[in-house]
Image (cartoon, rainbow, N blue to C red):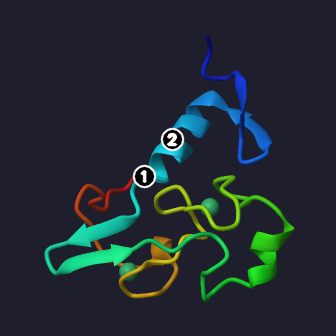
Amino acid sequence: MSDMELVPLFGQMIRRDWADALTETQLETHYRDAEGQYRRIPFGEENFLNPRIAEAGPCRHCRTIKGKLHFHACDYEQCPKCNTQQMGCDCEFIGHEWREE
Ligand SMILES: [Zn+2]
Ligand SMILES: [Zn+2]
């Protein structure tokens, strides 16, 4: 079995390794830091995105679908703590300490 193999997820065919990562991210419903925990924002509820983007199809960055969570720090994920686009904010959550890759 290869990671390049395509498997069905959310009504589309995507690479197995990405499908596994995206499935796993759904289990992390909250982010946490020293001050508390914050409910992650599913695709379609971001206040910086037009809701029609989620209606139109899967997230163009991480392939999640409306009502599901983005992969951590997807371009379209909204930070549940400061409510801005997460990739541009400075919040750090336990298990997701910011690092350059
Ligand atoms: Zn996404
Ligand atoms: Zn933030």
Q: Label 1, secondary structure: give it.
A: loop
Quick one: label 2 or label 1, which is nearer the N terminus? Answer: 2
**Viewer-nearest residue: 13 or 92:** 13
The image quarter containing residue 38 is bottom left
Please count the marks in the image. Answer: 2
Q: Taking 54 as reference, is 40 left or right?
A: left
- The residue at which mark 1 appears reads as 27
Q: Quarter of the picture for ligand 1?
A: bottom right
- Identify the residue shown where x is 59% and y is 38%: 18
Tags 2 and 1 touching, CB below 8 Å: no
Q: Is residue 7 above or below residue 11?
A: above
Kind of residue at disc 1: Leu
- Identify the residue shown where x is 75% and y is 85%: 50
Q: Is residue 2 above or below residue 85?
A: above
Labelled disc at residue 21: 2
- Identify the residue shown where x is 57% and y is 31%: 17
Number of the front mark, 2 or 1: 1
**Viewer-nearest residue: 98 or 64:** 64
Q: Taking 71 as reference, is 60 left or right?
A: right
